[in-house]
Amino acid sequence: MTRQVLVPPALRAACAQAGMSPGVVSHNHVFLTGVTGAGPDGAMPDTDEAQFNACFEKIAAVLAEADLGLDAVVEMTSYHVGLRGHFDLFDRVRRLHLADPYPAWTAVEVAGLRRHGAVVEIRVVAALR
């Protein structure tokens, strides 16, 4: 089986260091690794809103490597530290980046995430056109 790996230029160094692929094309879908709002230097934005926007921008960058946009997302799982405290804000930001028809979505509250200071990690599956 041949798989296409999707690595935006801005993420190449971090992905090589971590030994992971931001996105993998398999059959008719693109599977993305969960992303946090950390910048290429690993710094976490100061606000939840900035983290949320950065996540969707990273997802868009990975999908762009397959000539896809965020409208190709068919499933999303978001993992939240303090979900109830920031859900309304997350939902507003999500709606700025995703449009109707919205993807299937599961939001899960977790005790912590690997990246220090992260309040959300988002994982998506997109469909090829």
Image (cartoon, rainbow, N blue to C red):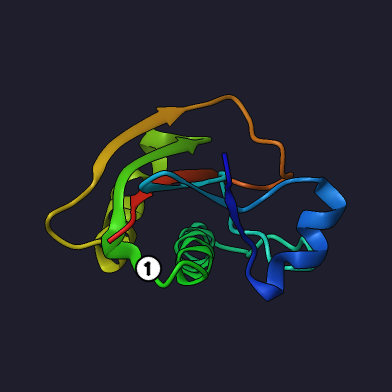
Quarter of the image where the C terminus is located: bottom left
Q: Residue at x 57, y 39 (%)?
A: 1
Left or right of 74 in this view: 5 = right
Residue bearing the label numbered 1: 68
Q: Classify mark 1: helix, strand or loop.
A: loop
* Left or right position of 50 against 89: right
Q: Residue at x 55, y 62 (%)?
A: 47
- Furthest residue toward front: 1
The image quarter in which residue 76 lies: top left
Q: Amino acid at mark 1?
A: Leu
x, y percentage for residue 20? Answer: 73, 46
- Give the crowd class for mark 1: few <14, some 14-19, many >=20 residues within 10 Å: some
Q: Residue furthest left?
A: 100
Q: Is residue 15 left or right of residue 61?
A: right
**Residue sitting at x 42%, y 46%:** 124
In the picture shown, does residue 2 fall above or below 93? above
Q: Position of residue 34 (x, y in %)?
A: 56, 44
